[in-house]
Image (spheres, grey):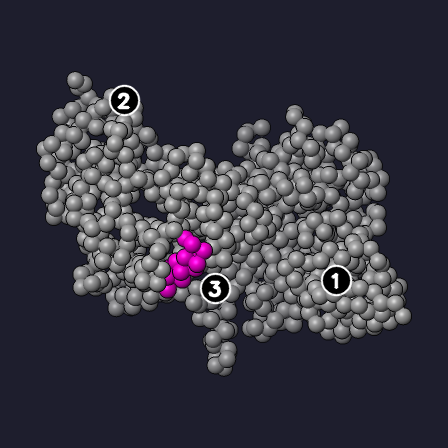
Amino acid sequence: MAVAHGIASGIGGIRAAGDLVARMQVSRGMRIKEAKEYVAGCLRISVEDIADPVVMSELREDLDIGRVNAVPGAAKGIDAKFRIAELLDIKINCVNKFRERTGL
Amino acid sequence: MGKYVTRMGDGFKVELTESEINRDIEEGSQEAAKNGQIAPLNQDESLYLLEIFKCPDRSVGVERGKEVVLSYDSGTTKFKRVNVSVSKIQSLQIYERMLGADTLELAHIDYSFKPVKPIVVFEQPILEQALLMTIPPLFYGAMPNLGLYSQPDGPCPNPGDLLPKGKIAEARASYEEQIEHAIKDMVYVGTRMYEAGADGINFDTTAAAGDAEFLATLQAIKILKTKYPEICIQMGMAAEFVLGMHGELYYENVRLAGLYPHKQLELAEKAGVTIFGPTTNIVTNRSLPWNVARAVTFTKACTEMARIPVHACMGMGVGGVPLTLSPPVDALSRASKAMVEISRLDGL
Amino acid sequence: MQDAIFTRMGDGERISMPVQEMKEELLEGTQDAAKKGRIPELTEEDLQQLFEILAEPGRIVSVPSGKEVVVTDDGCAKIFYSGPADGGAALPISRQNSVLAYERGFAADTVSFGHEDYSFKPAKALIDYEMQTYYTTSLATTVPCFYGSQPNLGLYFRPDGPHPNPADLLPHGRIDEAKAAQEEAAEQLREDMVYVGQKLAEVGCEGINFDTTGSAGDADFHATLMAVAELKEKVPLMSVEVGMSGEFVLGMHGGITFEGKRLAGMYPHEQADAAAAAGADIFGPAVNVNTSRSVAWNLARAVTFVKHVVESSKIPVHPNVGMGVCGVPMCVETPIDCVTRVSKALVLIGKADGL
C-alpha cells in the first residue's frame, strides 16, 4: 500500500526532498504549498524540482544532507539532520538531544 | 455504450458505464454533503473525478508538482505482519531508502498505548538508535484504543455489557474512568518517546471507541502540547463520524458525539494537533466512484478550513481505498490521485 | 596455595576473601538453606569441591569433558534485540535472526523466544502473530525451539487489569476480598495460558516455558500448575518447562492447595514435586541471591537447594541461572568468573540435568 501511494502521490523522501517538506509540516505546521515553497526557497530551486530525484540527488550530494545511496563518508542519519536543521532553520528534537548528550 | 472497469468497495471488479459512474459520483458526494452538512463536489470536480475513473491506465498518479508528503501508521509492524524477518530499525531503513518514505514511524507490534506502557524502555533505545541512522522525521505511533481499558482485560466495567442492560449511568461512569486511565498512559508514552528524541507522536485511529476515546485523546494531546510546545502531534481518526457511546462528552463546549471530519478538525486544532488525518469509511457494497466521491467531499471540507496540514487516512477501507487486505493498485492510485488533487491534501 | 581468593559479592562487587573466611561463608550458606528448607546440608566433600571451584585461579572455569549438560533458556535470544530490563542490547536484528544467531553462533542446545512483553496476557492479544513467528522460526531451527512467557498474575490486577489489587486490599485488612481477587485473577490467567499454549501447539510448538512461575505468590503458582495439567492433557506432545521465580512460594493468598498440598511456603523440592504432578517435563528451581552476602554464601545455598531437588525430583531439573538467581550476581552485565563457577558447581555438585 505504501509503495502504491508513494508512486501515485508521494514526493519521494530522501530520494527527492520529501523529508524536507515533511520537516516543515512537522516543525511549523505548514500547509503543503507553503512547505514546498519554503523548502524550494532554502534550496534555491523551483517548486517543481522538489520531487525530481535527478535534481535532488545532485543537490543533496552537494549539500551533504543524505541520499539513498550509501556513499562512504557522506552524511547519514544524525549527521544529515544536523545540516538539515541548519539549512531549513528549524529545531529537530533528536539533534538537540544529541547536542545535550555530547555536550557539543 | 462502452463500460469502464472499476471496483466495488470490497475490491471486486465491476464494469460501469459513464453515466453509472457519474451517477455514483453524484450520489456519493450528495450523501457526504447531506450527512456532514457541507458543500458537495462542484461540476468541475465531479468531471475531474469521472476522468480519473475513465482512464484506462492500470495505475494513475498526481500531476507533476502536486506530490504530497506521506506519513504512516504502524510503520514498523507492516514488515513483521507479513512475516518478513527484519528488525524495527531495518524496517525504517527500508522505508527510508527503498520505499521513498517522506516520514517514518516506529511502533510496537501491539499498536496501542496501553501495551506500549510496560515496554516503553525497550522502545526508547530502538528509537534513539533509529534517529542516529535515519533522516526523515521519525514519529512514534500508537492507538488510544480505549477498548483495552474495559473488562475482561482492562480495569473498568465493560460498557458493551452494561448498555444492553440499560445501565446507561454505569456505562457512562465506566467510560469516564477509562478516560482517566487512557490519558495517563498516552501522556506517559508520549513523554518518554519525545524525551528520547522522537520528532512527534502519532495518535492513530482516534475515536475508534467513540466520543470517550476522542475526549481522552484530545486531553492527552493538550497536556503534551503544553508540556512540549514544539512537539509535533499527528492525529488520525478512526471514522468519519464520532460514535456517541457516552453521548454527553464535550470538549471546549462542543459535544463530541456526531462530529464529522471538519468539526473534528476544529477541535484537533484547539487541542494543539499539528497534522490532522480525517477518515472516511468505505461502504463495501457501493462502487469506488461512489466511495471516493464521498471521501473527497468530506476531506475537502477539512482542507478548506484547516490551518494545519491535513493528511487523509488512506489505508485499507478508508479514504476510498477498498476494504481488502491487498488493495489493488488501480483502485488505490485513483483514490490517492483524487484525494490529493481534488481535496487539496497536504499529505496522506 | 593462595591466602586470599578474588571473588564477588551478590551484587557483583569484586572483593578479595581470605581462604578461611570463604570456607566459613560456604558453611553458613549451606546451613541457611538446610535450615530454611529442612533439607540436608552439603557434605564436607561437596563443600571442599565447591571451595576448589571458587578458588581456581583462572578467570573462567568449566565442567570436565563428559559432564556437559543441556541448556534451556527464558528467551536468551532476546538479549540481541531487547531493552534494558532484559539486559538487552537493542540491536537492529529481528527475533527470528536473533534465535538463529543464538542457535548457530552461540551453539545453543535449545532455543526459545517470546513476545517483547514477555507475559501470557500481552501475548494472548497477538497470538496470531506469535504463532506465525513461531512457525517460521521453527522451520529454520534444528534444536528444540520453545515458546516462553511469564504467568505474571500481577497483570490481572488494577490499575491495568480487571481485578481489585490485593496489594491495596491487604494493608486495609480486607483479607477475604484479597483472596477472592487472587482466585478470580488466577482463573483468568489459567484460561489465558491454556489458550496461548493450545494455539501454539496448532503450529507445532515443541515446548512451552512458564518462566518466573510463582512471582505473584501461591495463586500465580496454582494457575500455572492447573494450566500445565490442562495442556498436558490436551496437547501431550508439547513439552512443558516450569521455571520458578524464587526459592519460596509467597503466601499472598495462603490457602491455595494443589493435590492436597498447600502451595504457600513451598521450597524447591516441594515445588518440583508439584510441577511433576501437574505433568511438567522440566523443572527449573530458582534460589534468590542475597546481594549483601558473598557469591560463596549464595552459591553454597543454591547448590544445597538444587542438590536436594535433583535427588528427589522425578523430572529433569534445570536450575535458573540468570541474573540474581542460583548464585549469579544481581547485575545486568554478569561477570563470567562468577557465572562459570555457578554453572560448574550446579552441574558437578548439584548434579543438575541442565541449566
Upstream in sequence: badge 3 or badge 1: 3
Q: Are marks 3 and 1 in contact (CB under 8 Å)?
A: no
Q: Which one is in front in this view, the residue at disc 2 or the one at disc 3?
A: 2
Left of B8 or right of it: where is C108? left
Screen quadrant of the N terminus of chain C: top left
Q: Please indicate, yes or no, whether residue C247 appears anywhere in the rendered image.
A: yes
Which stretch appears magenta?
C191-205
At which x and y percent is residue C311? 16, 45
At which x and y percent is residue A96? 60, 36
Which kind of residue does numbered mark 3 sit on? Tyr
Residue occupied by mark 2: C58
* Residue under disc 3 on the same chain as residue under disc 1: yes
Left of B337 or right of it: where is C234? left
Label 3 and label 1: CA atoms lie apart by 31 Å
Marker count (numbered): 3
Q: Are marks 2 and 3 in contact (CB under 8 Å)?
A: no
Q: Give the residue at x 65% y 72%.
A: B258
The dot on residue C179 is: none
